[in-house]
Amino acid sequence: MAEVTFVIPNGILDRVLDGVAYANNYQDTIGGEPNPESKPEFARRMIRNYIKDCVIAYEAAQAGDSAASAARVAAESEIAIDE
């Protein structure tokens, strides 16, 4: 398995974690209890999900383009409209 590493300078790590947490609605507490998922764990999960969502969107677009092209070719060759 390939590994992707992001280097975040220590001086801005808290800002990055806070930004990811804010953008993705992280809660420090859930039902009055501390969140069992830390901000760093949450940020890693959100980044993995973002990458996965990008791949899914790309592959779905590619599949849609291929299906549309195949349908267009089939329609053009199978449907004769006399002018």
Image (cartoon, helix red, strand yellow):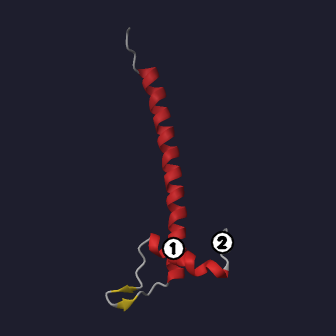
Q: Earlier in the sequence, mark 2 or mark 1?
A: 2
- Dot 2 falls on a residue whose secondary structure is loop
Q: Quadrant of the C terminus?
A: top left
Residue at the image position 53 percent from the left and 45 percent from the top: 62
> Residue 44's quadrant in the figure?
bottom right
> Residue 31's quadrant in the figure?
bottom left
Q: Viewed as shown, does residue 23 lie left or right of 40? A: left
How far across and down, in percent of the image, does residue 43 sit?
Answer: 52, 75
How far across and down, in percent of the image, does residue 24 sit?
Answer: 44, 71
Q: Amino acid at mark 2?
A: Phe
Q: Viewed as shown, does residue 23 lie left or right of 17? A: left
Q: Pick the residue in front: 33 or 15.
A: 15
Residue hosting label 2: 6
Between marks 2 and 1, how big is the CA–CA gap? 16 Å
Mark seen at residue 46: none
Q: Quadrant of the N terminus?
A: bottom right
Q: How many marks?
A: 2
How far across and down, in percent of the image, does residue 3 sit?
Answer: 66, 70
Mark seen at residue 19: 1
Q: Pick the residue in front: 60 or 7.
A: 7
Nearer mark to the viewer, of 2 and 1:
1
Seen in the picture, residue 12 relative to 48 is either above or below; the reply is below
Seen in the picture, residue 44 relative to 28 is either above or below; the reply is above
- Dot 1 falls on a residue whose secondary structure is helix
